[in-house]
Image (tube, helix red, strand yellow):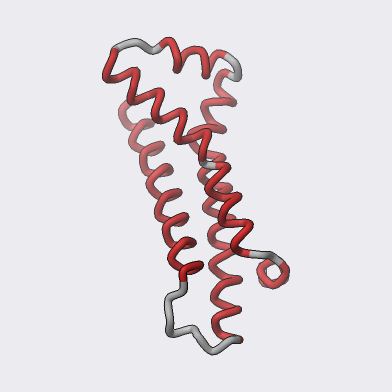
Amino acid sequence: MSAISNRINPRKWIVFGFFITFPSVIFWCFVIYGRISHDYALLNTLLNSGGDFCDLLLKGLFPAFSLMIAYICNRAIQRRAITQNVWHQETNLMRLNRILINWNALLLLVMIFSYFNN
């Protein structure tokens, strides 16, 4: 893990982490639209293309993979902050990484609640 965190560019990977959660956000927007309008045509079209695998991919795997990326970036940011002796200051990159971690935690929490409701 430390060898990976030494060689990555955290800014690019954090942006990539946000981009891979974009399909999950679209999926949950379709779910909310279906709940409000009682018209699940968009959601059914999305899920018919991939079935259970698409459902698992959109609900859990994308946010979990993004959370793993955020954790690796967090380690890399911490190491760089320690080597630059700014470990006591919060930088913009640290803030952005914390937002990514919270965002993924929210998406995974919504997934867990959706399994309880079904």
Farthest left residue in view? 36
Q: Give the x, y percent position of residue 38.
A: 29, 12
In the rendered image, the vertical position of residue 51 relative to residue 95, given as above or below: above
Residue depicted at 59% across the width and 62% down the height: 11
| Vertical placement of residue 95 versus 63, above or below | below
Picture quarter with the N terminus: bottom right
Pick whichever, 109 or 96, lies toward us: 96
- Which sits in the foreground, 110 or 39? 39
Residue at 33% x, 25% y: name it: 32
Residue 67 in the image: x percent, y percent? 52, 53
Residue 53, given in percent of the width and then of the height, sits at 59, 26
Please identify the quarter of the rendering in which residue 14 is found.
bottom right
Q: How many marks?
A: 0
In the displayed structure image, the side of residue 39 where residue 15 appears, left or right: right
| Residue reaching furthest to the bottom | 85
Q: Where, by quadrant of the figure, is residue 79 drawn?
A: bottom right
29 relative to 73, above or below: above
Residue at 46 percent across and 74 percent down: it is: 91
Quarter occupied by the C terminus: top left
Front position in the image: 109 or 97: 97
Farthest residue, direction front = 92
At x 43% / y 43%, what residue is drawn? 108
Picture layout, residue 79 above or below residue 19: below
